[in-house]
Amino acid sequence: MICHSTVRHILHLQVASILFVAGGAMAQVATPSEAKTLNELRVEAETARASGNHAQAASAYSQLAERVPENAEYWHRAFRAYRSMDSTALALKHLEKALSLGYFYDARWTYEAALMNARLGHTDDAILWAERALDAGYSGRARLRSESAFNEIRADERFRKLAGIPPDSLSRIDNWRFDLEYFVAEAQRLHVSPRGEAHSDTFLDAAQSMHDRLPSMTDEQIVLAFMRLAALLKDGHSVVYGPQSDSPIDIDLSELPVRFYLFSDGLFIVEADDNWRHLIGSRVTRIGQLSPDDALARLADFRGVDNAMTMRWLGVQFYLRRYLMLRAIGASGAQPQLSLSVVDRDGEARTVSIGSADWEARRKLRSQARPDTALWLRHVDESYWLKVMPDLSTVYFQFNQVRDKGNGEQPLAQFAVTLADSLKGSSSRNLVIDLRHNNGGNNSLVRPLLQQIIGWEVSHPENRLWVITGRNTFSAAQNFLNQLERYTDATIVGEPSSSSPNFVGEETDIVLPWSKLSASISSRYWQDSDPTDRRPWVIPDVPVDLSSDAYFTNRDPVLEVVFSLIRGD
């Protein structure tokens, strides 16, 4: 069966009926019979691609590319078919042509051209295409140092420079300086903020100061300095995480065996290992000698954000638990030991001394293991799920991650159809989309979902859309929220989102060559809102906060408000 998009493309061919000769110097109008032949080829190519017949797909797409040489998509699909057949030389020929025509994702595919040239033993061309990939903004530069295809050319000085391979026998300080220069160069190459932070005097002066102070700094201090440097890029995706397992540096990565959450009435302990479970439900009044507000304010020096909600989420969930960070802000001493002042559930104030433990805190807010868990906390680890609520003429759809479930489960595109069927089958007039646990994923997956939601909303004047946001609504979830805000009449309820409507953001794989510090530098500027939109976040139409009392008594004030509005109370 041919998909609708294929039919549309065929119709476009019939309407346009234009063939471009190679080089684009002249145009030739196709006759009806020629257009029919093109359509037949297109159908043959699409059918072969869908069925996995790579040889037939390669032949058909290659013929289409020769017939319509200005169509980069034909060249690229021929490349992919030949690549699936391990026909490297033919794949490379078609890929290079697609790239010469301006095919999108050029950085990724230019890197692919470098790989194939290396596999074919074309050293000079491999280096040339690798350089082009970096110039085009390819973010996986570390792969040049590890990809087996480049083994034969890794000793070439031109390639070593591109890959960022340090000279042999450098001292510890010179190795750190090599990493610092590499990080600054990557920031200037990749970071796409229109404000130009990576080229600012503030960023460059901080890098120079760090360079000068390196001989007197410990490894831990240097890691913290890198984190400060990344924070100066001023976005929520540019960050230094820490050393990989094969790093030559040894720093303390121990963590507190408790997990915090910042409610409307203060910072509370919501999870802990077995030794500290009695502290769950306690309000934190002091972290060392710092108030929770002061501690979070100091942590902001080490983490770039899109807006203040980012630190309420990431700062509390991760940074406030790490002894590396607790020492950096002056909350603890050299040893992994923290003085924590709390008011417990009985109202008793006390101070406890907590060390570290081999305990991994779970991501995202969780329930307190009650049999009657509040709806929004029941399936936090599922990427998406829904519940039909006939008494409210409502479908509740919780969207927790912008990614397919995998493991043979229903992908998001199919779930979009299930959602539409559930709305139609139940005759529901309300759709509630809960984005409070969604910190992002793959933007390319949401189109089928948006189509079904928009189609449902416009299909009947009584249909109403409700969207719940929070501090964890970030990255690709923010982009999804932007589209809902622009193209629907949704009522937004809850907390502000954690990204800006237009934001610099893309997780990249940056690994510093010597220290093996893992990092990310945002390499895309997303403008899913109006280009002039400078809001730091999306403010709900109906703001609703979560208090500690509501959480610990298993209430969800946000859904209570939404359901009240649906009922017309």
Image (tube, rainbow, N blue to C red):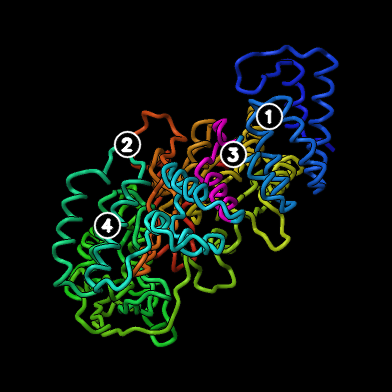
**Quadrant showing the N terminus:** top right
For the residues labelled 3 and 1, the Cα–Cα distance comes to: 46 Å
What amino acid is at disc 4?
Glu
What amino acid is at disc 3?
Glu
Q: Indicate which disc residue 96 carries.
A: 3
Is disc 3 placed on a helix, strand or loop? helix
Tell me which numbered mark, 3 or 2, is placed earlier along the sequence: 3
What amino acid is at disc 2?
Pro
Membership of 99 in magenta stretch: yes
Image quarter for residue 223? bottom left
Is disc 2 placed on a helix, strand or loop? loop
Q: Which residue is mark 2?
A: 194
Tell me residue 484's x, y (percent). 53, 37
Q: Indicate which disc residue 181 carries.
A: 4
Judged left or right of residue 228, residue 436 is right
Residue drawn 32% across the image and 73% down it: 322
For the residues labelled 4 and 2, the Cα–Cα distance comes to: 22 Å
Q: Is residue 287 above or below residue 47?
A: below
Tell me which numbered mark, 2 or 1, is placed earlier along the sequence: 2
Tell me which numbered mark, 4 or 1, is placed earlier along the sequence: 4
Tell me which numbered mark, 4 or 2, is placed earlier along the sequence: 4
The answer to whether the residue labelled 3 contacts the one labelled 1, judged by CB atoms less than 8 Å apart, is no
Magenta segment, which residues?
A: 98-118
